[in-house]
Amino acid sequence: RLRQRKGVMKGNIDLLVLKLINRFLDGYYRRLNDAKTSYHRNRFSNVDQQSLFREVEKMTSGKRTNIFPSSLVDPADQFLTYFNDKIRNLHSKLCELPVLEPNIYLPPCTCSSSFSSFLPVTETYIKQIVLKSPTKFCELDPIQTVVLKQCLHVVLTPITNIVNLSLGGGSMPDALKVSQLAPVLKKISMDPEDMSSFRPISNLQFISKTIERVASPQLIDYLMENKIYPNLQSAFRKGYSTETALLRVQNDLLEALDSGHQALLVMLDFSAAFDTIDHQILLGRLKSRFGICGTALSWFRSYLTSRTQYVKVNGKTSASTPLLQGVPQGSVLGPLFFSLYVSPLEDIFTAHDIDAMIYADDTQLYIILKKHDSDTAIQRLEHCLHDIQAWCLQNKLVLNDGKTEAIYLHSAYAKSYPAPPSVYIGDSLIKIKTEVRDLGAIVDENLSEES
């Protein structure tokens, strides 16, 4: 407004007044920039890593717009049908594939420790969880989360009782096992006219996620204390993150390149990984491999069974259908369940002497190619990939051969180096790229990195 007034007044006031206005405006914008800088500095100074990445993503990714295929007549029902048919077709494809015999047979893993029940929590603990939770709203919630936080002193006791009764009784109430699905573009750059560009994100009730937020750390603490948490898994582990996973892999590969060797980094891709988890296999693995039993196992079984879901698009709601497999994307326990589900993959990596690192559902394996044994290393890698494929078939996961990719790494200072090797997974030749995205970082063939 001052700038506009300045333009109107320019012909009627002397230069001294103009200088005063300019000085005032310069001071105003300088203080405004200082205030913005101070705000963002305070905003990021005392937050955990997860919150930091969430805030940075909000600032850099741009606002997502709800654009859906224009050809859809009833988008809610059609998206629900598409998501259900996709999983059904993947399972049908698995049934049609021949059984693969692994190169190395691994004995079943057993557990000597046990986790039979959840510990009850106090109102103080629940208060901390609620106040730290994102202020998101689910239409299934009786009141908005922001209102619940404001009147928490009134509802804290019943919320604490609900959590303790659920976990202590080994049962998740059916009313809290409903998911409202939102079709979300996998990447902003993908075609919004193609339904395959969307993934279903579950919007769950706040109380449901609060119960999960109590169950998850107790399970993780048990796994860590008994040293049975997957060794190569960087997710959900204190002191570990995407950065530590990247640093571990980068360090190993840089050492190899500095020694004059080459390397091959393979990035596995699972189709609809979270949506294809078999509930019975997961429950069996929780019991046999991780010692989950008693009331705790009953609660996990109750959490997974009798779930329903529906899609809501542009204010219209689809019919409700049962969730017969998979874990809700957007849930607290979903990524942890997947990590435990695929934990036997570590046994396969170890058996074939293949280096690997996993972060949730991002799995990467790598080999060092030395002049005297590069052919042996490639053969070891292919045998390992074969056994991974065989394990996936047995455990009803779909390893996407077409989207699994690799990068051939060599030193930028090497005057010459062998041609990239040919690596097969089954009958499919893995694509060798000169640049890949690894846990958010872009890595090229010389192992330079760009975030």
Image (cartoon, rainbow, N blue to C red):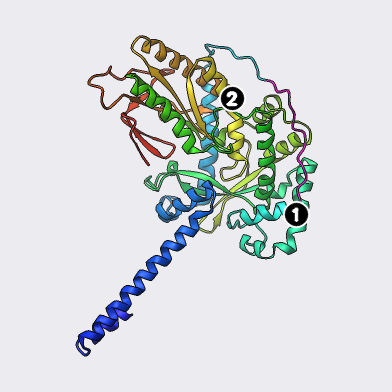
Asked if the magenta segment contains residue 119, the reply would be yes
User: Which image quarter: residue 156?
Assistant: bottom right
Instruction: Please name the amino acid that badge 2 sits on.
Output: Asn
Secondary structure at badge 2 equals loop
- Reading the image, the residue beneath label 1 is 123
State the residue in front, 60 or 242: 242
Residue 287 screen position, x and y as percent: 71, 27
How many numbered marks have been drawn onto this rendered protein structure?
A: 2
Task: Quarter of the image for the N terminus: give it.
Answer: bottom left
User: Which of pointers 2 and 1 lies earlier in the amino acid sequence?
Assistant: 1
Q: Residue at x 70, y 37 (%)?
A: 300
Residue 82 tag number? none
Q: CA distance from mark 2 to mark 1?
A: 40 Å
Residue 371 visible, this orientation: yes
Give the extent of the magenta segment: 110-123
Q: Is residue 397 above or below residue 243?
A: above
Residue 378 screen position, x and y as percent: 40, 15
Secondary structure at badge 1 equals helix
Structural crowding at the residue carrying mark 2, measured as other residues with C-alpha within 10 Å and reported as few (<14), some (14–19) or many (≥20): some
Residue 395 tag number? 2
Structural crowding at the residue carrying mark 1, measured as other residues with C-alpha within 10 Å and reported as few (<14), some (14–19) or many (≥20): some
Asked if the magenta segment contains residue 107, the reply would be no
Residue 329 screen position, x and y as percent: 56, 43
Q: Is residue 363 left or right of residue 153?
A: left
Q: Is residue 51 above or below residue 367?
A: below
Observer-side mark, 2 or 1, equals 1
Q: Residue at x 48, y 53 (%)?
A: 55
Q: Is residue 270 above or below residue 216?
A: above
